[in-house]
Amino acid sequence: MILKMEKIVVQISAGQGPAECCLVVSKVLALLQEDIISKGLDSEMIECVHGAKSGTFRSVILMVCGPGCASIAAQWKGNAQWISQSPYRPSHKRKNWFVTISTADALVQSDWNEEDVRFETCRSSGPGGQNVNKVETAVRGTHIPSGVQVLAMDSRSQLQNKKHCLERLQAKVLLARSSKEQEQQQWLWQEHAKVQRGNAARVYRQRL
């Protein structure tokens, strides 16, 4: 098994929220990364979906590694409420913006089998010169049951890229099952903010 015990997957998502929620994702990400560093842990961004506005994210997925990372990630799990005037719509009355922080144990084996992964090699693009482009070192992995794909081309070694690909693919598959649930939860936050406001795991009162 490639994934080691001391790893946890963390996703921050704006769901179907507006641009302000995407900005909150980037703000919460920065705070989470600061906390990870302060605890002596490491993190790697597995995937990100950029928002419509520069510097914002609709969602990000991190792999957090190190002793006690699961308990630390659990402290962040839940809905985060950011109270601020919109920087994009100054006259807008709404001041409460919500994002969802979820976690998945990197060792959870349900719905995961390495035999369900199909690997393909291809030529890497970007820095590295002609040697990179001539040799098929990049690896694309497809989880056949779900259709989730990952392309890894970090290294000039095909074996290393396969390792990165498998690790990231498993992280994405573990989170894929909860994506629709998170989007629905985000919608409920928007529609029922008055009822749900007190249930936020974290509340921030800062200018966006």
Image: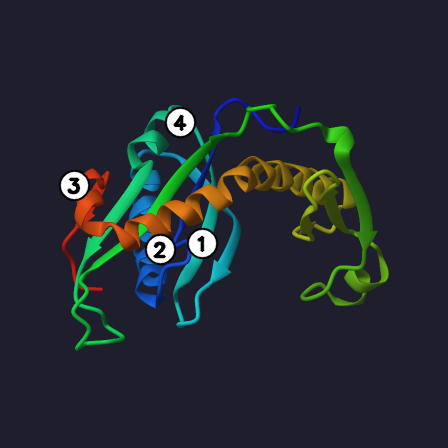
**Amino acid on which the number 3 mark rests in the picture:** Gly
Circle 4 Cα neighbour tier, 10 Å, few/some/many (<14 / 14–19 / ≥20): many
* Pointer 1 or 3: first along the chain: 1
Q: Are marks 1 and 2 in contact (CB under 8 Å)?
A: yes
Residue 85's quadrant in the figure? bottom left
**Amino acid on which the number 2 mark rests in the picture:** Val
Q: Residue placed at 45% from the left, 42% from the top?
A: 181
* Pointer 1 or 2: first along the chain: 2
**Amino acid on which the number 1 mark rests in the picture:** Ser
- In terms of secondary structure, where does tag 2 sit? helix
**Colouring chosen for the image of the structure:** rainbow
Disc 1 target residue: 59
The x and y percentages for residue 191 are 28, 54
Q: Residue placed at 29% from the left, 55% from the top?
A: 190
* Pointer 4 or 2: first along the chain: 2
Disc 4 target residue: 70
- In terms of secondary structure, where does tag 1 sit? strand
Question: CA gap, disc 4 to disc 2?
Answer: 20 Å
| Foreground pick, 143 / 73 | 143
The answer to whether 159 appears left or right of 111 in the picture is right
- In terms of secondary structure, where does tag 3 sit? helix
Circle 3 Cα neighbour tier, 10 Å, few/some/many (<14 / 14–19 / ≥20): few
Disc 2 target residue: 25
